[in-house]
Image (cartoon, coloured by chain):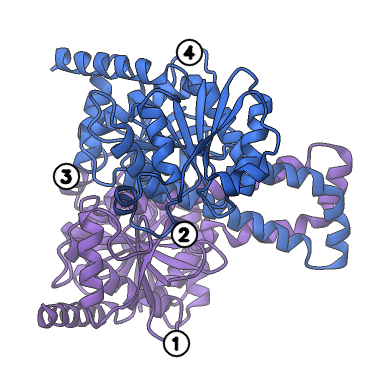
Chain colours: A blue, B purple
C-alpha cells in the first residue's frame, strides 16, 4: 500500500512527523511512504532515503488556525492539498496529516471526493479503553440524517473488522439515552429502525454512555455533535481521574515510597488509555481513508497511525462502496 | 423547608430510603420530612417518630419498569403521586424519589406543573469531579429548542448559586464541539446567540467535552440527549479507569503490599467521584424542585440528596420564575 504523509502539518512538523514516518516505513517494508513537503525543510531530516520512502514536493503548509477551504483554494501547492491530490490520482491509497482537522476534512472532500452512496463523511476514532471500540462520527458531520448513521455503521463495520482484526462481523451499537428501541430523539429513533432493517449490519441495539468503554459493541454510531462531545468527555475524564490518582500518590513521603513500587503498573494503565496508541482518527466515507493525526502528535503517534492505516486500508474503498450499496438494497427491500 | 420523601420508590425501598430520610432529619432540625408510604411497610422502620418527621399514607408504589404516565393515572394513591400532590398543595416545597426517573418526571409534570415561562423541564446533575459543575439537561428533554437552553441556563444558574454556595454569579458554559461561537449544529449556534444576548446569564462561551470536568464553568448547558450521554460517559469512564488502577494494584504480592499503604488516599479519590455524594439529580423547571435519587441509592445517598435540596430549595420556585421573566425581557430588548 502507498501512503502519503503530510510532512508539514501539525505542531511538531516536520521533525516528529518525518521521524514517525521513517519508523513506520521500517515496520512496513512492503508499503511505500510518500513524504509530502518542501525540499528545504524535509530533505535534511532524511539524508539517506530508505528504499520504500520517496519525497514529493509541496511548497507551503496550511496553518492550524487558517480557514481550511479558503487556504486550500489559495494554495493548491500546500502539503495537505498535494497529499490529497496523490490519493485522487491513485498515486497513494491513503494520506496522513497532523494538521488541523478542518483542513484534513476539507482536503479530502475537495481533493478526493466522497464514496458513492455516502452523503457525508465521518471521523472514526478508537476509544482508548481495555476493550476498544470504534466511535463514529467524532465530529465531521454535526447535523446528521438517519441514513447517515446507517452509512456510518456500514463504513465503521468494514473498517473495524480490518483494523481490529475481528473474526466475526463487528457488533454495531447506536449511542442513545436508553437501551429500549423507543428511546432518544427523532434521529436516534429513525436510525434505530434503519439499523435494525439493514441486513449488512450486526446491530446490537442502543448503547448508553456508561457502556461506551465496556466492550458491548465494536462500533459505536452517533451524529458528529454527540460523538465529538462523548469522545472529548471520555478523554478528559480519563486524564482527570489519572491526575487525581497521581496527586494522591505524591501527597506525602510514605505514599511516594509506595507509589514508586507501583509506578510501572500505573504507567502501564496510563499508556493503555493513551490516545497516541492509535495516533489519530480516520476519516471514512471518502475515496481513500484519511488519517487525522493529533495536532500535537510526536513520532510514536505518527508511526502508530501510519501502521494502523496500512493494516486496515488496502482495498478499503472498494469494499466500503460495495457494503454501502448492499446496505441500501437491504433497507429498500425491507421497506 | 418541608420535604416529601417517597419511601416506596427505588431498589432498596423502604429500608434504605427511610434510614436516609431519618439521618437527614437529624441533620436538618429546622426542616420537616414527610415520609410517604404505606403504614404496614414504613411504620415498623420508625417505631418512634422524631419531632420533625411525619408519615403520610400512600397505598402503592410505581414499579421501575411500569409505564410512568399510565401507572400514575391508574394509581393516584401511589407514593410518588402522593408525594407530588403534597407539593402541589403547598404541604411540601420539594419531593425526593429514588423510583424510576420517568415516574419522577411524569409525577412532577402531571402533579405539580411547570414554572411560568418554562416550556420544558431539565434534569440537573452535579458532575462529580474535583471542580464540580452542574450539568443540565441530563435527559428530561431530548429534543430542545434554543429558548429551552437559555431557560436551562437561567434555572441552572439560580440553582447552582444556592447549591454550591457561590459568591458571584455562576459561570454558564454551552456544551459544544469547539470553542468558537460559530461551532456546532443549528441548536448550539442559536442557543449561543441567545445566551450571549441574555443579561441575566454570565455566559462564558462554548465548553468542549474535554473541559466538562476542568472547572471552566459552574453550569454546563446542553440538550437532554447530549447531556445524558455526556453524564453517563463521564461516570462510566471514571469507573473504568478506577477499575484499571485497582487491577494494577492487586496484580501481584509486591503491588498489593504497596497498595495497602496507598489505600486510604485512593479510597479518598474514589469517594470524591462517587455519585452518591450528591445522592441524585434535580428536576428543575417545575413548581417545586424534585430530587431524583439513584435507583440503587442507599441511606447515605438519600441523606445527601435531602440535605442538598434543603440547602438549595427554599424559595427556589419564586426566584426561578422571576429570573426566567427577566431573561425573557432582556432577550426581547436585545432583538
Residue annotated with mark 1? B167
Q: Position of residue A329 (x, y in %)?
A: 20, 14
Badge 2 and badge 4 in a common chain: no
User: How far is disc 4 from disc 1 in space, using C-alphas?
Assistant: 57 Å
Left or right: B322 with respect to A31?
left
> Mark 2 vs mark 3: which is more N-terminal?
2
Determine crowd level at label 2: few under 14, some 14-19, many 20+ residues with C-alpha closer than 10 A. many
Q: Nearer the viewer's eye, disc 2 or disc 4?
A: 4
Identify the residue shown where x is 25% and y is 33%: A148
Residue annotated with mark 2? B18
Identify the residue shown where x is 57% and y is 58%: B273
Q: Is residue A300 visible?
A: no
Left or right: A298 with respect to B88?
right
Determine crowd level at label 1: few under 14, some 14-19, many 20+ residues with C-alpha closer than 10 A. few
Using the image as rendered, state which of residue A175 and residue A7 is in the foreground. Answer: A7
Q: Quadrant of residue A67?
A: bottom left
Residue annotated with mark 4? A168
> Mark 3 vs mark 1: which is more N-terminal?
3
Badge 4 and badge 1 in a common chain: no
Q: Report if the CB atoms under discs 4 and 1 are less than 8 Å apart.
A: no
Q: Nearer the viewer's eye, disc 4 or disc 3?
A: 4
Q: Position of residue B332 (x, y in %)?
A: 10, 79
Using the image as rendered, state which of residue A57 and residue B119 is in the foreground. Answer: A57
Q: Secondary structure at mark 1?
A: loop
Q: Quadrant of residue A243?
A: bottom right
Determine crowd level at label 3: few under 14, some 14-19, many 20+ residues with C-alpha closer than 10 A. few
Q: Nearer the viewer's eye, disc 1 or disc 2?
A: 1
Q: Nearer the viewer's eye, disc 4 or disc 1?
A: 4
Amino acid at each position: 500500500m502507498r501512503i502519503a504523509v503530510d510532512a508539514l502539518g501539525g505542531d511538531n512538523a516536520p521533525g516528529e512527523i518525518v521521524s514517525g514516518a521513517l519508523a513506520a516505513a521500517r515496520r512496513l517494508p512492503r508499503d511505500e511512504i510518500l513524504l509530502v513537503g518542501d525540499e528545504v525543510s524535509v530533505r535534511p531530516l532524511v539524508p539517506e532515503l530508505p528504499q520504500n520512502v520517496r519525497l514529493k514536493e509541496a511548497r507551503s503548509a496550511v496553518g492550524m488556525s487558517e480557514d481550511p477551504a479558503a487556504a486550500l483554494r489559495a494554495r493548491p501547492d500546500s502539503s495537505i492539498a498535494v497529499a490529497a491530490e496523490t490519493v485522487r490520482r491513485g498515486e497513494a491509497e491513503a494520506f496522513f496529516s497532523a494538521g488541523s482537522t478542518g483542513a484534513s476534512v476539507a482536503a479530502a472532500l475537495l481533493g478526493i471526493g466522497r464514496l458513492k452512496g455516502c452523503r457525508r463523511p465521518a471521523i472514526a476514532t478508537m476509544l482508548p479503553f481495555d476493550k476498544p471500540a470504534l466511535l463514529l462520527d467524532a465530529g465531521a458531520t454535526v447535523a446528521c440524517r438517519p441514513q447517515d448513521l446507517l452509512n456510518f455503521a456500514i463504513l465503521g463495520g468494514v473498517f473495524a473488522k480490518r483494523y481490529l482484526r475481528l473474526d466475526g462481523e463487528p457488533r454495531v451499537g447506536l449511542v442513545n439515552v436508553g437501551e429500549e428501541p423507543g428511546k432518544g430523539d427523532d434521529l436516534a429513533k429513525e436510525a434505530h429502525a434503519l439499523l435494525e432493517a439493514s441486513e449488512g449490519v450486526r446491530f446490537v441495539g442502543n448503547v448508553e454512555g456508561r457502556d461506551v468503554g465496556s466492550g458491548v459493541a465494536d462500533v459505536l454510531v452517533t451524529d458528529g455533535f454527540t460523538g465529538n462531545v462523548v469522545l472529548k468527555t471520555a478523554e478528559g475524564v480519563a486524564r482527570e481521574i489519572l491526575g487525581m490518582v497521581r496527586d494522591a500518590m505524591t501527597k506525602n513521603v510514605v505514599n511516594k515510597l509506595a507509589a514508586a513500587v507501583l509506578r510501572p503498573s500505573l504507567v502501564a494503565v496510563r499508556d493503555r488509555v493513551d490516545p497516541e496508541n492509535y495516533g489519530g482518527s480516520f476519516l471514512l466515507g471518502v475515496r481513500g481513508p484519511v488519517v487525522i493525526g493529533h495536532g500535537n502528535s510526536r513520532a510514536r503517534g505518527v508511526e502508530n497511525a501510519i501502521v494502523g492505516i496500512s493494516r486496515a486500508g488496502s482495498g478499503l474503498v472498494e469494499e466500503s462502496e460495495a457494503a454501502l450499496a448492499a446496505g441500501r438494497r437491504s433497507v429498500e427491500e425491507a421497506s
